Amino acid sequence: MSGSITAPDTGRTPYRVVLAGARGHGRRHLGNIRRLQEQGIVRLVGICELQPLAGQELDGLGRPEQSTDFAALLDSVRPDLAVVCTPIPTHARLALTAAERGVHLLLEKPPAPSWAQFRRIAAGVAAAGVACQIGFQSLGSHAVPAVRELLADGAIGKPSGIGAAGAWSRDESYYRRAPWAGRRRLNGTDVLDGALTNPLAHAVATALAIDGSTRGEDVASVETELFHANAIEADDTSCVRISTTRGSIVTVAATLCAEQPGEPYVVVHGSSGRITYWYKQDRIRLHRAGHEPAELSYGRTDLLENLLAHLSGQAPLLVPPAATGAFMRVAEAVRQAPDPVALPADAWRSLPGESAPRRAVPGVDGLVAASADTLSLYSELGVSWALHSSVHA
């Protein structure tokens, strides 16, 4: 899927990498670093984790220095770049710690739990002159520019709006994975671990990218409807409608309480057709008047590879902080909205999950799809538990 890059002859390759957060989602980054180390492009020189990695976890990675102190680790091993995949509330502190030392960054999404912290990160990396890639991997898909080109060519006529839908399922163990899981705040600190801002954040960012509205100033207003079926603070079933400064409409409907989980997608509506894009699969389906539906698949550029290519002067960054400003405006609207409404007990049911029971909301799969299809909020689709719940920001 992703293309490999050639390590440039700069005298500094392989690039020296530190990974902060090597378990949980961080295992994916660890595997990716292992792949690039086998190609001779990078060398893992440090790992920041609460419990040291050992045995098979380090296969193919040599003996990187390990520490629980990120700043001390950076000072000791002096890497070229750091991959940060730690709890959301730590992102700003760790990103600035790296930037102050001239260390380039791949910062896992969401970049921050608030607009203020996001601005601190953006200002800090700019002042330090370091490159910062935000880990919205879907934005490395070659399908995103392909869809935008189809729209520019008038393939589906005049665009009338974009809807995104994500119907996933998470069992109760998901919300026990860390003290901050499913929280909006923890010990007075913003967390924002909700469906729209963390697990299905790619749906928001990808829809905005296809719309061409990626900067913070591109967002005019955001309507939010936030709910939870699980015993958590944050939303697990929610939707937003974003109005942009150029007059376009983007809706995103998400749930972690699906009855039958499916692939998330973005659908672009036009006057003479539609484009459906399954962003985890890099696959699109083009429907247009007078033609048979066409399916196309695309490749994807790995964001760490793109960062390395950027550092060697071979490519621009795909997802710099500025390209996630619109997403962060949406996240800020979610943060500032009233706390999510708990669904009544008769609105969900308990089903067996992978490792623990899971809560499913009957009919929510169709509701999420209907939102993307009609660009409507849940309350506008007649579901009783969503009536009178919209908040405009």
Image (tube, rainbow, N blue to C red):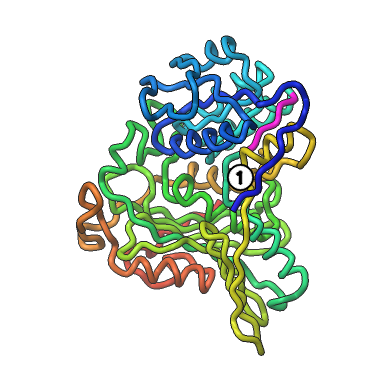
Vertical side of 95 occupied by 288: above or below: below
Name the residue rendered at 61%, 35% in the picture.
Answer: 39
Q: Nearer the viewer, residue 377 or 3?
A: 3
The reply, left or right, for residue 188 in relation to residue 231 is right
Is 348 situated left or right of 246 in this image? left
Picture layout, residue 110 above or below residue 341: above
| Residue 190 vertical placement versus 172 (above, below) | above
Q: Which residues are magenta?
A: 129-133
The picture quadrant where one finds residue 36 is top right
Q: Where is residue 266 shown, x and y percent of the image? A: 55, 64
> Residue 255, percent across and down?
39, 57
Say which quarter of the image contains residue 187.
top left
Residue 182: % across, % down: 35, 41
Q: Is residue 209 visible?
A: yes
Is 2 on the left or on the right of 236, as rendered?
right
* Dominant secondary structure, magenta: loop
**Which residue is disc 1 drawn over?**
302
Determine the residue located farthest toward the bottom in the rendered image.
Answer: 290
Q: Which is more toward the observer, 204 or 1? A: 1
Is 326 located above or below residue 144 in the figure? above
Using the rendered view, name the quadrant where residue 7 is placed: top right
The question of residue 237 being in magenta is answered with: no
Image side of residue 107 versus residue 225, left or right: right
Mark 1 nearby-residue class (10 Å; few <14, some 14–19, many ≥20): many
Q: Secondary structure at mark 1?
A: loop
Q: Residue at x 48, y 29 (%)?
A: 60
Instruction: Name the spot of residue 188 as percent of width and height, x first.
Output: 41, 27
Residue at (45%, 15%) from the top-left corner? 67
On the question of residue 114 being in view, the answer is no
> Residue at (37%, 33%) from the top-left corner?
180
372 or 74: nearer the viewer = 74
